[in-house]
């Protein structure tokens, strides 16, 4: 169905307000209360108090099925940056409104995968928006502000593997800061061949994955086509004349086009776009648009260059003109859904033949 420009603006404004104001609710409940130096106290609390992932309240999403009714594939998901605060550098989810907003975006971003597998999505103490952006700009290889999110992702994944996975293969899904968290997880945890064999794919969207990352962890590889498995699938979306971006332009940035699943500069026309999907602030679909945009890989910068309907409606005031970071998933929603199923099917077929 078609949607009007006002519906698209509602979708964009929801994420602008979400990023800037939604998490400010935590300033009331906060990750730590009452100290003269709230930033230092918040850091101390995060350093000394690990998250208890046996408590279901510390998970954004969990399957609602009994074990015997679970799908044969799991989805392990980490959400993008949702937290803004002048005084508290680390997210917490003690505000019901913050938890609900995080759940909304998790439901939307896992939508292309949720009918395929069982979704496990932990809360993690991600870095605050402005501090995380400053780290990416000044120290792209260090990401100190995200260190608690890295640690929590690792602990949550270990808990999931030990208590809930049951030997099933899985897909990792993350966007933006969530994708950075999962990239670190892959580097740290996936040296073991047994774990590598269970990975269908890692969709690390909105996070640059570079040759340097792969050199650091040579057991990782990026996708080269629509069906390979055990791979990282990554892109960062922008307009043809986009402002300089924190997510592209690094030497050796890997990118795959989600419309034709190529890594070269061959453009996929808008007709290859099965459907962009947009949501309102109440998590309702405001529209689904087949043929929404074309896309091609820009080999020099490693960007995914998209030309959408209504260009100019998706720029981010925080990130710059023509940076479509907040729509990395929504622009290609149905193509991602089909591809996840195709990769999973090829994974199972290949393993059956190997046996």
Image (cartoon, rainbow, N blue to C red):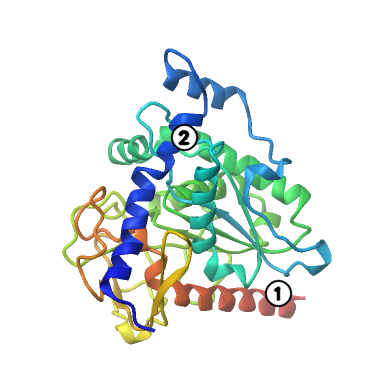
The answer to whether 142 is drawn above or below residue 350 in the figure is above
The answer to whether 249 is drawn above or below residue 44 in the figure is below
Q: Residue 154, percent across and down?
A: 61, 42
Disc 1 crowd rating (10 Å Cα; few below 14, some 14-19, many 20+) is: few
Residue located at (68% from left, 67% from top): 73
Horizontal relation, residue 16 to residue 280: left or right: left
The answer to whether 81 is drawn above or below residue 284 in the figure is above
Residue located at (80% from left, 62% from top): 66
Q: Which residue is mark 1?
A: 351
- Disc 2 vs disc 1: Cβ atoms closer than 8 Å? no
Q: Quadrant location of the N terminus?
A: bottom left
Q: Quadrant location of residue 69?
A: bottom right
- Nearer to us: label 2 or label 1: 2
Using the image, tell me which numbered label, if any, was put on residue 157: none
Q: Residue 323, percent across and down?
A: 26, 58
Residue located at (71% from left, 56% from top): 194
Q: Residue 238, percent across and down?
A: 26, 63
The answer to whether 280 is drawn above or below residue 102 in the figure is below
Q: Residue 342, percent across and down?
A: 57, 79
């Amino acid at each position: 169905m078609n949607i009007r420009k006002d519906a698209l603006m509602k979708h964009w404004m929801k994420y602008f307000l979400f990023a800037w104001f939604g998490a400010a609710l935590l300033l009331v409940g906060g990750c730590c209360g009452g100290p003269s130096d709230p930033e230092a106290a918040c850091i101390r609390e995060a350093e000394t108090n690990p998250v208890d992932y046996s408590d279901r309240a510390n998970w954004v999403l969990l399957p609602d099925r009994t074990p015997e009714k679970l799908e044969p594939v799991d989805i392990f998901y980490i959400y993008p940056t949702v937290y803004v605060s002048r005084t508290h550098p680390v997210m917490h989810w003690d505000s019901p409104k913050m938890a609900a907003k995080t759940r909304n975006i998790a439901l939307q971003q896992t939508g292309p995968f949720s009918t395929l597998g069982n979704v496990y999505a932990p809360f993690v103490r991600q870095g605050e928006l402005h501090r995380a952006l400053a780290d990416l700009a000044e120290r792209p290889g260090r990401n100190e502000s995200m260190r608690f999110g890295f640690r929590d992702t690792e602990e949550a994944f270990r808990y999931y593997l030990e208590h809930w996975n049951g030997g099933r293969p899985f897909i990792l899904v993350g966007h933006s800061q969530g994708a950075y968290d999962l990239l670190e997880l892959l580097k740290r945890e996936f040296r073991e061949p047994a774990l590598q064999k269970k990975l269908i794919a890692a969709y690390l969207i909105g996070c640059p994955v570079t040759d340097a990352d792969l050199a650091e962890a040579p057991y990782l590889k990026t996708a080269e086509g629509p069906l390979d498995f055990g791979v990282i699938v990554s892109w960062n979306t922008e307009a043809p004349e986009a402002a300089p971006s924190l997510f592209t332009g690094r030497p050796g940035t890997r990118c795959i086009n989600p419309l034709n699943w190529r890594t070269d500069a061959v453009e996929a026309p808008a007709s290859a776009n099965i459907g962009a999907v947009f949501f309102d602030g109440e998590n309702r679909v405001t529209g689904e648009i087949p043929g929404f945009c074309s896309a091609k890989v820009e080999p020099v910068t490693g960007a995914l260059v998209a030309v959408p309907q209504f260009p100019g409606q998706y720029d981010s005031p925080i990130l710059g003109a023509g940076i479509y970071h907040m729509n990395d998933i929504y622009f290609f929603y149905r193509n991602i859904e089909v591809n996840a199923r195709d990769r999973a099917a090829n994974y199972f077929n290949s393993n059956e033949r190997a046996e």
